[in-house]
Image (cartoon, grey):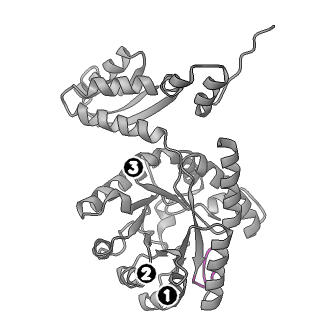
Amino acid sequence: MQFIVKRIDNKNISNELELIGFDKSYVIEASKKHSYMTLKIQNLPPYTATIIKQTALSKGTDAGLHRDVLMHKKEVSDLILSGTIKQLKEISKSLSYQPFNLKEIALEIDKEIELYYKKNEPEIMGILNLTEDSFSRDGILDINTAIKKAETLIIEGANIIDLGAESTRPNANKIDVEDEIKRLKPVVGELKKSGYILSIDTRNHKTADIMLNSGADIINDVSGLNYDKEMINVIKNYDKEIVIMHSKGTPENMDELCKYDNLADEIYNELYKKIEFLNSKGIENKRIIIDTGFGFAKNIEQNFELLKRIREFNSLNVRHLAGVSRKRFLQSLSDDKNNEEFDNITMLASFYLIQNNVDILRVHNVKKTKTAIEFYKKLTC
């Protein structure tokens, strides 16, 4: 019989080993030799970077760093470390006995290996806009209509309802806080009677305080705590979750701020600092959700770049929300300017986000997103 060579998906390596008759008792350990991962370690002094590179070489793999490090012409360098899971575990073990903070780096490598095996079914956050100028043209101001819409979203599969009374579309004007509260409070009060998990999309601490006191479960701050400096004090007072989103400027001017030297790294590092800030205020990671901010101070090409690299943000080790639904960069793929077409494209993006272990999908069309999740489960069960 003629031999056949074919490529297989690394994600299914354990199952593939079993199918060829490999010893089942050793499958998990053996899969580490076939699973591959690349890490980026930032801001290393030359001696630390050199030790990591030498350690990697000793384990049969390699690390890339600035060409001037070995010549001692560079004071700091980022490093790219690649290898099988088994090799990375061996590197981590060796580094744990080394000086120069290498023990801490070893712990971070171990954390990344643990995250590599993370598998989850994302929650769906259904969008309920209580405004007349929503960018997706689906705003509702009537209380009864809003409540019925929320009930429909839950029936279709939403785990969370995200209510917002202020449009955050590009060039949108800010709303008066009293009007924001007036729109939100009666709807929140009625929906909590049904026990729904509610997220409040607001930048204002006064709104957040009243809504949390009314039973809301999550505050979704699109400014990432930048807009209202009192927001952090409200969050500290409640044992509830906070979504911190990456953004620049305000909806009025964010389209003018799409300037980055390294998009993914800059967004990652800003969110990292926000998490550190929240931790310093006594807010643990289990209460923090990050959002990379699709559409906020990012142009079409930058949004696609961010989507392509979305898995990298799982390294922040907090829950991860993605909001791509009906965003302009997805709309750029179609000449049909209607929500049904945008929802079809959103479903494709959602499927990619599911594959990359995003924890929460914030969407307008819950039913299509639920279909994407069920489809993915069929491929991975």
User: Which dot, 3 or 2, sits closer to the camera?
Assistant: 2
352 lies above or below 20:
below
Which quadrant does the C terminus fall into? top right
Q: Is residue 290 visible?
A: yes
Task: Find out whether residue 297 is within the magenta segment.
Answer: no
* Secondary structure state at the residue bearing disc 3: helix
Which residue does the numbered mark 1 point to in the structure image? 189
Q: Is residue 133 magenta?
A: yes
Disc 3 from disc 2: Cα separation? 28 Å
Relative to the observer, which residue lies in front, 192 or 282? 192
- Say which amino acid is labelled 1: Gly
| Residue receiving disc 3 | 316
Instruction: Specify the label residue 215 is tagged with.
Output: 2
Between discs 1 and 2, the one toward the N terminus: 1
Span of residues in magenta: 130-139
Vertical placement of 6 versus 255: above or below? above
Mark toward the start of the polypeptide (3 vs 2):
2
Q: Which mark is residue 326?
A: none
**Proximity of marks 1 and 2: CB atoms separated by less than 8 Å:** yes
Q: CA distance from mark 1 to mark 2?
A: 8 Å
Q: Marks 3/1: CA distance? A: 34 Å
Q: Which SS type dominates the magenta stretch?
A: loop
Q: Position of residue 99 (x, y in %)?
A: 18, 28
Q: Point out the image quarter for the N terminus.
A: top right
